[in-house]
Amino acid sequence: MRILLVATPVGPLGSGIGGGVELTLHSLVLGLTAMGHDVEVAAPAGSLLVGQRTHQIPGALQPSSQHTGRDAPVELPVEGVLAAMWAFVREHQSDYDVVVNMAYDWLPLYLTPFLEVPVAHLVSMGSLSDAIDAALVDVLAARPGSVAMHSRAQAATFPAIAERVRVVGSGIAPQRYDVRLAADRPPYLGIVGRIAPEKGIDDAFAVAAATGLPLRAWGLMQDQACWDGAAAAHPGADARFEGFLPTDELQAAIGGCAALLMTPKWVEAFGNVAIEAMACGVPVIAYRCGGPAEIVVDGVTGFLVEPDDVGGMAAAVGRLGDIDRAACRRAVEDHWSVEAFAARMEAWLLGLTTAAPGRRRW
């Protein structure tokens, strides 16, 4: 197939602003290309070059939906990159057999019925916006089968369509991650992700304070006040922010952790950082909600505790000796590899291209 991946419009690829969507896109490029498909990318100007060709689209970045209310109106900046990317799709749609939308935005959903090329919407977040919820209902009515999500928990946040979306998971290239069969000494805990309220950094500080283990954080410093507030609330925590690192540097940094903490205050659509840590042999201690609850096998690749149960998470740290770090790596190789993810995506995309009237049949 000739595939165009349309990246998130909130930031250039490589900036870290797009969070896990960036890693997902890279995995798709790698996996689908290895299967023999021609894969190109449309992304905001200034993006890293990925795929056979990366179309650099200029324009004002799109505000993220993560920090707006459910009833917030649809927002389209003047000369915005989101509109420019979909103008590019309209102009060049005959060059592709299918377009994969990776933006959590209203506009591509609305435009889908007006395009001849099949558009596959890979939704990256749980339900946050009434406008997007309604647009997903409409697009599935017009183009059945055109919406996929990363986890069953994510799909459940969209009750009107939960039974009609495809669940494709995610994946990484395990060969890019060096497995560490023993944690560094003295031990320390890790957390990876944007520093923002919905990621629950305050709880991670609390676990560090309760266990007496240092905490190391990697990611994009999106909300300095959030970090400062957690530090003030937990003066006994030895926490250090290590900054945003690209994949190869990140895996080298996190491999020595005794465990990766996942303390989200919202429903994580998947949790790519969980499989990244596990690929390094690092167990994951996560709240039993969202995508991480479908990744972590309790007692085998880490531990699941009830949401907001800081005490339970601290207790789980004391049981890390029960985890075989080699089993963490095997779980990624068996279930969350690029190859497995690409195969799931290929099956979905082939179905959409076959169903599209008057277009190339596979």
Image: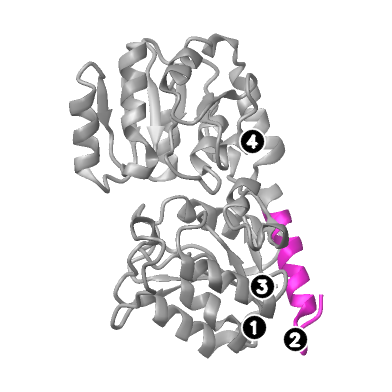
Task: Say which residue label 1 marks.
Answer: 117
> N-terminal of the two: label 3 or label 4?
3
The answer to if 361 sits in the magenta stretch is yes
Quarter of the figure with the N terminus: bottom right
Q: Which residue is mark 4?
A: 332
The C terminus: image quadrant: bottom right
State how far apart marks 3 and 4 are (Cα): 32 Å
Q: Is residue 245 visible?
A: no
Residue 291 against residue 100 in the figure, above or below: above
Tag 3–tag 4 contact (CB < 8 Å): no
Based on the picture, tell me whether residue 194 belongs to the magenta stretch.
no
As shown in the figure, which amino acid type bears the numbered disc 4?
Answer: Val
Q: Magenta region: which residues?
A: 342-362
| Tag nearer the camera, 3 or 1 | 3
Query: Within 10 Å of the Cα at label 4, are there few (<14), some (14-19), or many (20+) other Cα atoms?
Result: many
What residue do we see at 57% from left, 42% from top?
291
- The amino acid pointed to by label 2 is Arg
Reading the chain from its start, which is encountered first: label 4 or label 1? 1
Identify the residue position indicated by label 3 in the image.
Answer: 140
Which element is circle 3 on?
Answer: helix
Of tags 3 and 2, the one toward the viewer is 3
Is there CB contact under 8 Å for labels 1 and 2? yes
Residue tagged 2? 359
Q: Is residue 305 visible?
A: yes
